[in-house]
Image (cartoon, helix red, strand yellow):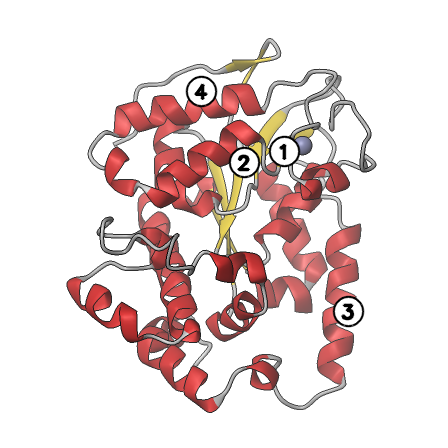
Amino acid sequence: MPSARHILIVNSRSVHQPVFVVGAPHSGADLIGRALKASAGFHLTLGQPSVLRTVYAFARRPSMHAGRAQAAATVIRDAFAQGWRVTSHSCLECTRECRAAAGLGEGAAGPCVELRGLETFGDASPDLIYCAEALTYAFPDARIVQVVRDGRDVVAAMLADPVVMSWFRPSFVNVDTEFPNPFFGIESEEDREIWPRLSPAGRCALRWRWSVRLAARLHHSLPPGQLKTIRYEHLMSKPDDQLAELSRFAGTTVQAAGIRAEARVSRHRSRGRRSPAWEMSLSAEDLAEIEKISGEELRRLGYLP
Ligand SMILES: [Zn+2]
């Protein structure tokens, strides 16, 4: 059930239908976040410290918030009230990606957005997906953009990303103390039992599978006007169609240059080869494990026959 309506005021503007972009790591959520950030009237943040702190508290210690929806919603609204505030130094502590997407140089101070004409607040911080359900509670009128991509491509990209892989360091893994554990995709006793024996590809596949199951839950709980699901593959093959739909959903003309450029590169790459990208980097054993763990989800989404 949505919570009672709270009015969040930031820079003397009330936050109305904020837009949040979520997806598994390397599913393209960052690409859409950057495009929205560059769109007129949008103030979208990508890794404000107050938001990241909250996101990782939810990701690491989900048990702390379980069954305390009201308290969690307050924590989230407070984090965004701070993160969205526009001051002369507002993007200074943001992630490098946020500053770059705002066109700010390495050491440049200054807000990443013009206050004038600012209509819509949003966020596409990394790993925001781990508070997606709490977000819809904290902001009952929130609009969620979720990005879904072939799990085999996601796993291949995760395996090549040292930051993502560093979450699997023994000192960081908390699958024994936190259960269920969305961050590691562990939902059942069986998942917890097989986890120690899984290969890195299998562990990444579990994380992807959780994101897809969450996508299905959001699809059932949110009205169509509040949820837009985008397939990364469609975004790359038909960027203009997808951008038009995203623009309608977000109520702005989404800045297209970054996505079009990425789609061109992706088309160019796929023209030069006969087999899918993941085939280059995943071993037969990796693929077998990915399909064992997430075959049902891959089939449901049409990525596997
Ligand atoms: Zn920023």
For residue 153, side relative to residue 90 (left or right) = left
Label 1, label 2: how many angstroms apart (C-alpha)?
A: 8 Å
In the image shown, does 67 or 178 lie closer to the viewer?
178
Q: Does the residue labelled 4 lie within 8 Å of ligand 1?
A: no
Dot 1 surroundings within 10 Å: few (below 14), some, or many (20 or more)?
many
For label 2, the SS is strand
Q: Which amino acid type is shown beneath numbered disc 4? A: Asp
Quadrant for the N terminus in the image? top left
Label 4, label 3: how many angstroms apart (C-alpha)?
A: 40 Å
Residue 105: horizontal and vertical position, in percent? 83, 36
Tell me if I can see residue 222 in this picture. Answer: no
Label 4, label 2: how many angstroms apart (C-alpha)?
A: 17 Å
Looking at the image, which residue sits at the far top?
12
In the image shown, does 8 or 230 lie closer to the viewer?
8
**Mark number displayed over residue 265:** 3
Q: Which amino acid type is shown beneath numbered disc 2? A: Val
Check whether the beta carbons of the residues at disc 1 and disc 2 lie within 8 A of each other. yes
Residue at (45% x, 40% y) in the render: 226
Check whether the beta carbons of the residues at disc 1 and disc 4 lie within 8 A of each other. no
**Which comes sooner in the sequence, label 1 or label 2?**
2
For residue 38, side relative to residue 46 (left or right) = right
**Mark number displayed over residue 19:** 2
**Which comes sooner in the sequence, label 4 or label 2?**
2
Q: Mark 4 points at which residue?
A: 78
Residue at (33% x, 74% y) in the render: 198
Query: Which numbered disc, 1 or 2, marks the residue closer to the eye?
Result: 1
Q: Mark 1 points at which residue?
A: 44
In the image shown, does 253 or 276 lie closer to the viewer?
276
